[in-house]
Amino acid sequence: MTDFRRPLIVPCRDASWNLSGEVGARVTAAIEQWILPLPYANPGLLEMFRERDLQPARDRCPWEGEYAGKYLTHCVQIYRLTRDDRLRRHLEWFVHELRSLQAADGYLGPWPPGSRLTGSAPNSRIRSSGMDDPLPTWDAWGHYHVMFGLLLWHMESGDDGTLDCVRRIADLMCSTYLNGTRLYATSPGCEEMNMACLHGLCLLYRQIPNPEYLRLIQQIEADLQQPQCGDYIRVALEGKEFYQGRKPRWESLHVIQGIGELYYLTGDERYRDAFENIWWSIVRNDRHNNGGFSSGEQASGNPYDDGAIETCCTIAWLALSVDMLKLTGNPVVADEIELSLLNSGLGFLSRSGRWCTYNTPMEGSRGAFVVDHNWQAQPGAPELNCCAVNAPRSLGLIGEWGLMEDAGGLAINYFGDCAVHTRTPAGNAIRVAQETDYPASGRIEIAIEPKAPESFTLRLRVPQWSHETRLALNGSPLTSPRAGAYAAIERRWCAGDRVTLELDLSLHYWVGERDRAGRSSVYRGPILLAHDPRLSADADARPPRFDAARMGESRSSFAGWLRPWLHYQYASGPGDIALCDFASAGATGTPYRTWFQVDNVERAAFSATNTFRSSRPE
């Protein structure tokens, strides 16, 4: 086997999570109301592959082939999180059905003969667009998502038949694109979509180091240097921002994941540097106050831009950020992941688990994709669209970053009431349990319960915004840890050891510029606070005005049946105003606000540097 580079920090092995509280309820809802019933409510998820040879060919959306792969991806990740037996049986059935639909030549897409991996098909059409001419197909893009989901299942299940299915897709790609045909030439205008297969091919090559796969990887990497294909590496290494490149759409983030994988395959530091530069560029310029990424489905260089913050874009940002955390081990990256998950990531999911949004704006109102943006619906697949098959991945990714290991020990990144059964780096069983109502309060009690005593380092993420943090071991205070770093405790751990972490949930602010000049966003720890008029006694829809120098806080109760997750009262002029967590705002369709006029914000504690506009350390 080729000796590849390894990530600095990786998810803990064989971890099984029991999540409580709001996040745990969301995971349960996603399994019960979405994952398990979806194929039966939307049989077109699988049947589109069986119907590809039928004539007359049914019109299909250019990216329809992605749905099964995106669905499979979040199913596997949520299974890896929960180890739910029903979900495992469901996955075994789904993968068996999907594999049975692969053509003899390895093709696993929805397009008819003569149109496979060509970038065009006579039935690639969106009737609601008013255009009759066929649209370019995102066929290689669809295969990328199918490859990725199947690879995840192979790595989880060890099923060689699943890996063989992925191998046959890659063999077809090699026979198609290593004969003089360039992948980008088959997808004019859609290069960032179809060339995302670089990521899947790199992951497969680590499993099966076939020289033909490496040839195709190298060919795609060379083609990426062309301007119409993004030229991501050169642009990033020259210090330009991501939004200044030729391909700043969100789909490019999966190509960039492939660039990160090139570093592991080759050890070439240019790939690592380009990957990191792009990630930091997005944080600086294109990550919104709610943790969402994109403005109108791409980077614009303006985090105040009111363009749609598409669910798929934020999911891609979360996936890219998890890769960044593995590559660097920088806890500030985990701060960013937490921000995106607890605000936008929960905000685009209905609490019921039955639907998601297309757009989760900083301010405004949220609607279900199938109502507001329903043109992707098809007979036999009324609920399928690009975001719906993707949204639960925000929850499934918790298992990728929440508890991690490196050569020296374990790192806790996710905070919330939970218990995790996993293994130490030495391979011994351990239970790590948190007792907390975080982020309602900052106190987190952590029980460390190894099966047998063992020496290792436990690292706890101390968020950037926690300026006054307390840490104790078995009741004895330890040195106050530094914000934006890991607090490391090295010792021989025994069952019964307890760590107490107390995070500072003092309010902090993002002072707006450009489109939000004169306004500020208010955060309580990782939570963006929002004003929803239905939660106010006077039902006043006007945005409140605050004085940061005297924003006294009190926990508020809500008499209605649809209670927000977090709900507080703050002083505002002559009276108090209710604010809630961003994910709960607008739950009934009311318009909400997150940018307020805040007086004296320059004198408020910790407001001088907004801790959610991360700067790259020197």
Image (cartoon, rainbow, N blue to C red):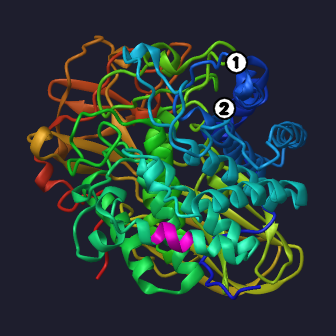
Report if residue 27 lies within the magenta region.
no
Which residue is the site of mark 2? Answer: 112
Q: Percent from the top left, x then y, of residue 417?
A: 66, 49
Q: Which residues are magenta?
A: 217-221
Which residue is the site of mark 1? Answer: 55
The residue positioned 20% from the left and 24% from the top of the image is 543
The residue positioned 49% from the left and 77% from the top of the image is 328
- Total labels drawn: 2
Q: Secondary structure at mark 1?
A: loop
Distance from disc 1 to disc 2, alpha carbons, whole Å, reads 9 Å
Instruction: Identify the image quadrant of the C terminus.
Output: bottom left
Do callouts 1 and 2 mark residues in contact (Cβ within 8 Å)? yes
The residue positioned 47% from the left and 48% from the top of the image is 186
Report if residue 218 lies within the magenta region.
yes
Dot 1 or dot 2, earlier in sequence: 1
Foreground pick, 244 / 354: 244
Quadrant housing residue 530? top left
Quadrant housing residue 336? bottom left
Label disc, if present, on residue 269 of the rendered structure: none
Answer yes or no: is residue 470 visible: no
Q: Is residue 342 above or below residue 564?
A: below
Foreground pick, 308 / 558: 308
Quadrant housing residue 515? top left
Q: Is residue 492 left or right of residue 417?
A: right
Q: Percent from the top left, x then y, of residue 244?
A: 21, 58
